């Protein structure tokens, strides 16, 4: 295969005595949809935070398209094509929906003109079905719309790799299906996707490959069928919760 | 770009109109115009101070160092004049530039501090600066008594052709125009910031710095830009004020009072807007003068009560109050000044552009 667009190797994060992420390694190839699953507290979100730069790892490295970005600040990683949607939706409260998305469009890449930024923001709003709500204050959005805004903002930065943290959580099945379609169509445009998910049918439908984490470390790694057949995975899930 | 140009032209036109105020006051009030002109000049000064503070506040940095930057502007004008006889037209801008450079240094040192920690650090910085200036050898910075600074305007009394009070009037008129010029400059800078993408960057950083970073905003650089621009204006102001007061001194030029005014006025008028700080400055300056004339003793108590009440009952300042009233009058939606509720089911809202001038005021 070609060089992976995202390579995580030996990633470790300790908070005092607690090891949240321990020696995690994985490669994601361009155009892939890669899932990270695992019980609560397995270190999934911490891993994404290390990849997007909100946390600095204790050890290991993150390589984006061949360049080591382990020590780069978040905005620098964003400029290099790393987009991120958060699990706990956190829109900028004093802005409208369109203004929120515009931030990503204006600052996501260097040297974007004002007109081009507006075009990108409109495109992202259109993609995520938020165009009719463009001028609404973000306080008026419901959960589904907030999740869409998270994705729209990340899309507006024109990412090459998009990190999605439980964007389906709390959605009704029909809403989740719409979100799955959205993620798939984004991938079809060439964006590589790394997502954390608890809803197993979503993982089954979307993921090309799956990384299972437990207690901060890799438990299993492979296709959906492979990992769900792994007795260790079954045990970890039965011990924690049943989702599938 | 279009709207930026339009806003700038409006600001310039209003400034041009205000420039006629001294002549109007003279026609209306005769010799009393001198004190009205002083009041108007103080209001302009307060407006510049408040607007410059607000520009930094837009990034979420609550600075208690504004007196440091007006002080540096004042001292650099005084010292440059004393040792290098730098002409005032150069000395005043240099005061602004030096204040901006100092802000970059302070900013770089305090970038990692948030909220109250940043505020405390900036307050300490002001005190350190005041002490350093005081302890410098007297032949350099004048020590505790300070340095005299010549006035910008020295109208001469011509017996028979003018009355005594007209000398004071002409002097005050000169400072009025200088401060009006400063205010127009500050407004132009503020509008340019509000109409550029820096506005989104400022708001994003203020409301969620982490997410702003993930969206590609460079928080450190953005804050430094705001800090430098804000301090440049404060430095210009300090330099002009040194000439108007006739001297600089550690206690006078680095007074905490300046910092307090710089932050109270925008809060009273309406934060994160161009109009708010200016509106607040006008109302507060007039209020202080009225109270002072009504109760010669203890007028500050009344002033304090008004400020406390305004913070309690107008959380978004005068601008918030006025837009709220404006919305109600035009019947656009039922939103009050501070209300943030709307339809929760996510139905599209009417794209409620706030009426008239409040596009700028909408946070």
Image (cartoon, coloured by chain):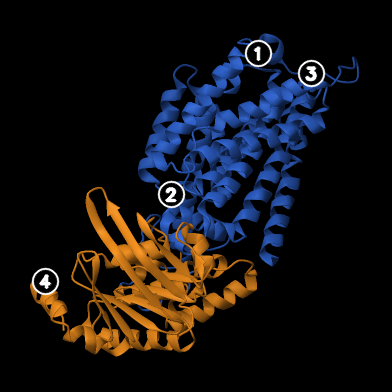
Pointer 4 with pointer 1, Cβ within 8 A: no
Circle 1 residue = B146
Pointer 3 with pointer 2, Cβ within 8 A: no
Q: CA distance from mark 2 to mark 1?
A: 40 Å
Q: Element type at marker 3? A: helix
Image mark for residue B83: 3
| Quarter occupied by residue B82 | top right
Is residue A169 visible from the viewing direction of this image?
Answer: yes
Taking the spot 69% from the left edge, 52% from the top edge, the residue there is B11
| Chain where mark 2 sits | B
Q: CA distance from mark 3 to mark 2?
A: 47 Å
Tell me: residue B213, above or below residue A231.
above
| Chain where mark 4 sits | A
Q: Is residue B157 left or right of residue B127?
A: right
Q: CA distance from mark 4 to mark 1?
A: 72 Å
Labels 2, 1: front one = 1
Is residue B32 visible from the viewing direction of this image?
Answer: no
Taking the spot 27% from the left edge, 51% from the top edge, the residue there is A15
Labels 4, 1: front one = 4
First-in-chain label (3 vs 2): 3
First-in-chain label (3 vs 1): 3
Image mark for residue B316: 2
| Chain where mark 1 sits | B
Q: Colour of chain A?
A: orange
Q: Colour of chain B?
A: blue
Q: Element type at marker 4? A: helix
**Is disc 2 on the same chain as disc 3?**
yes
Labels 4, 3: front one = 4
Q: Element type at marker 2? A: loop
């Amino acid at each position: 295969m070609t060089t992976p667009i995202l390579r995580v190797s030996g990633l470790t994060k300790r908070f005092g005595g607690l090891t949240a992420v321990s020696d995690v390694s994985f490669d994601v190839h361009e155009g892939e949809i890669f899932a990270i699953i695992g019980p609560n507290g397995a270190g999934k979100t911490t891993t994404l935070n290390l990849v997007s730069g909100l946390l600095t790892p204790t050890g290991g490295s993150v390589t984006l398209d061949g360049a080591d970005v382990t020590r780069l600040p978040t905005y620098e990683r964003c400029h290099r094509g790393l987009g991120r949607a958060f699990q706990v939706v956190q829109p900028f409260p004093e802005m409208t929906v369109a203004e929120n998305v515009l931030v990503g469009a204006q600052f996501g890449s260097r040297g974007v003109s004002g007109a081009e930024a507006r075009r990108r923001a409109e495109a992202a709003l259109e993609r995520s079905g938020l165009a009719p709500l463009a001028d609404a204050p973000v306080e008026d959005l419901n959960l589904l719309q907030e999740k869409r805004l998270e994705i729209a903002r990340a899309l507006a930065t024109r990412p090459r790799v998009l990190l999605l943290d439980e964007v389906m959580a709390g959605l009704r099945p029909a809403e989740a299906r719409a979100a799955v379609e959205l993620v798939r169509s984004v991938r079809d445009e060439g964006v590589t996707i790394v997502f954390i998910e608890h809803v197993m049918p979503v993982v089954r439908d979307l993921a090309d490959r799956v990384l299972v984490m437990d207690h901060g470390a890799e438990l299993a790694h492979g296709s959906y069928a492979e990992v769900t057949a792994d007795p260790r995975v079954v045990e970890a899930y039965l011990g924690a919760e049943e989702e599938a | 770009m279009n709207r930026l140009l339009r806003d700038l032209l409006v600001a310039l036109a209003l400034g041009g109109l205000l420039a006629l105020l001294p002549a109007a006051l003279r026609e209306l009030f005769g010799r009393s115009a001198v004190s009205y002109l002083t009041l108007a000049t103080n209001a302009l000064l307060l407006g510049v101070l408040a607007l410059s503070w607000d520009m930094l506040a837009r990034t979420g940095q609550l600075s208690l160092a504004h007196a440091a930057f007006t002080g540096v502007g004042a001292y650099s004008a005084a010292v440059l004049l004393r040792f290098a006889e730098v002409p005032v037209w150069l000395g005043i801008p240099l005061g602004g530039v030096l204040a901006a450079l100092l802000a970059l240094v302070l900013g770089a040192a305090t970038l990692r501090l948030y909220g109250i920690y940043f505020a405390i650090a900036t307050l300490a910085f002001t005190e350190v600066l005041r002490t350093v200036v005081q302890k410098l050898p007297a032949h350099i910075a004048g020590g505790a008594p300070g340095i005299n600074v010549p006035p910008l305007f020295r109208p001469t009394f011509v017996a028979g052709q003018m009355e005594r009070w007209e000398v004071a009037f002409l002097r005050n008129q000169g400072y009025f125009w200088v401060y009006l010029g400063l205010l127009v400059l500050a407004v132009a800078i503020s509008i340019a910031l509000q109409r550029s993408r820096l506005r989104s960057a400022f708001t994003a950083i203020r409301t969620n710095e982490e997410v702003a970073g993930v969206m590609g905003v460079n928080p450190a650089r953005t804050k430094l830009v705001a800090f430098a621009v804000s301090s440049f204006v404060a430095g210009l102001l300090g330099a002009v004020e040194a000439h108007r007061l006739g001297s600089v001194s550690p206690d006078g030029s680095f007074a905490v009072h300046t910092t307090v005014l710089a932050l109270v006025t925008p809060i009273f008028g309406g934060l994160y807007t161009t109009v708010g700080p200016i509106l607040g400055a006008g109302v507060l300056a007039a209020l202080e003068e009225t109270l002072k004339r009504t109760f010669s003793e203890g007028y500050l108590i009344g002033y304090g009560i008004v400020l406390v009440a305004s913070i309690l009952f107008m959380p978004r300042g005068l601008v918030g109050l006025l837009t709220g009233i404006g919305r109600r009058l035009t019947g656009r939606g039922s939103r009050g000044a501070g209300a943030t509720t709307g339809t929760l089911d996510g139905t599209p809202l009417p794209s409620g552009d706030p009426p008239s001038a409040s596009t700028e005021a909408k946070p």
